[in-house]
Image (spheres, rainbow, N blue to C red):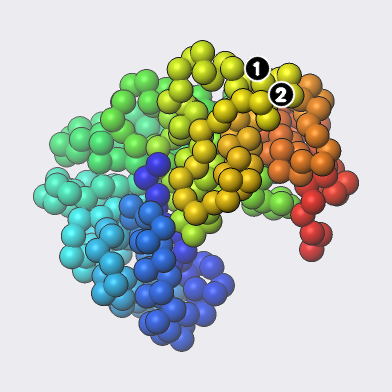
Amino acid sequence: MIIIAEKLNGTIPSMAKAIAGRDEEWIKDIARKEAADGAAFIDVCASVEVGEVETLYWMIDLVQSVTDVPISIDSPSTEVLAETYKFCKKPGLFNSVSMESKKHIDSIFKIMAENPGWEVIAMLCDDTGIPKSAADRLRVFDNIMKKAEEYGIDPSRIHIDPIIEAAALMDPDREDGPGITINTKVIDAIRAKYPTIHITSAISNISHGLPARKYMNYAFASLVLSHGLDSGILDPLNHGMHAIIDTTEKMLKLSDAEMQKIVGAVKEQTLEDVELPLPDGDFTPEEARKYAEMSATILAMKELQMTVEDLEPDEEDRNIQGVSYAAEALLGLDEDGYCMSYIEAYKDDLFGVPKK
């Protein structure tokens, strides 16, 4: 996965404090760590009411003083993006454009036409807001691609954001079905039409408002990877997420026979007897196996459309409990909708996560 590192963002309280106090060492330290932990782009977002361009220049300069990882310039204003890209020593990523008239997609695509190395995140929304159906999001996508063709922007330079909404707010009765069905339909359609395009998401958006957020984030990452997502805005310092992504990607490359063996083992509760691909990184054997088993469980639940009741996970395995309830919700298999079974399982202490 192409990792767009998310921590240098002024909407995060600790980062807002560092920006306000001009804490250069704090910002440089995070940039170093993000680069060391696999960031392909380092997102830089000032999120200030006054002096955004100047603040972004200062932040970008700090990042570039400690790493040569490309910058993702993050601003709701395309005017700011068009000004601040000039501060970057090498081509990076514009975050973001859309078909909203205030976003001025033409100005960014014109810059990209003149600067071939630059890439862009394009969100599937327009002046009507966030479309409520997959068909309408794909309509926005088609309009974005018409613009890209007009300016000679190759699909491989575009990261499409299908817009992930919080799972707790997803309407189980909407047109495209429950769970993340709207997103997977959009991703499947885009991936089939444009094999070289990138599809991205702010991974942690899925778990806003929910407890034990890591399990929802893990399940979501694994599921959307299986549909063709290949780019993500996330915290590269989160080694658990790294492990889930790594093991999922490895399992998706297995032969059908190998994967079916894993799926069957999840169903028959004999997963401990099956060899699994393990994540790279500084993990103990027990930790590596834990993440591999979580990824296997998520993918098997998708393959078999299994509920938690079907799976009957070991009550002592809190990690499998967590991702199985999360996968059930995201797959739209929770009969109550709105992640109610997930929330109740958390309240019943099935995840072993301390209550706040």
User: N-terminal of the two: label 2 or label 1?
Assistant: 1
Q: In which quarter of the image is the C terminus?
A: bottom right
- Name the amino acid type tagged 1: Gly
Q: Quadrant of the N terminus?
A: top left
Of 267 and 272, the residue lying toward us: 272
- Vertically, is 59 above or below 183? below
Kindly identify the residue that appears in the image at 77 percent across and 54 percent down. Answer: 353
Residue underneath mark 2: 270
Identify the mark at residue 264; answer none if there is no mark. 1
Separation of disc 2 and disc 1 at Cα?
8 Å
Of 3 and 147, the residue lying toward us: 3
- Name the amino acid type tagged 2: Thr
* Residue lying at the far right of the rendered structure: 348
Quarter holding residue 231: top left
* Residue lying at the far top of the rendered structure: 257
Horizontal side of residue 33 vs 183, given as left or right: left
Image coordinates for residue 135, horizontal then vertical, percent: 48, 24
Whether residue 103 is visible to the viewer of this picture, yes or no, is: no
As helix, strand or loop, the secondary structure at mark 1 comes to helix
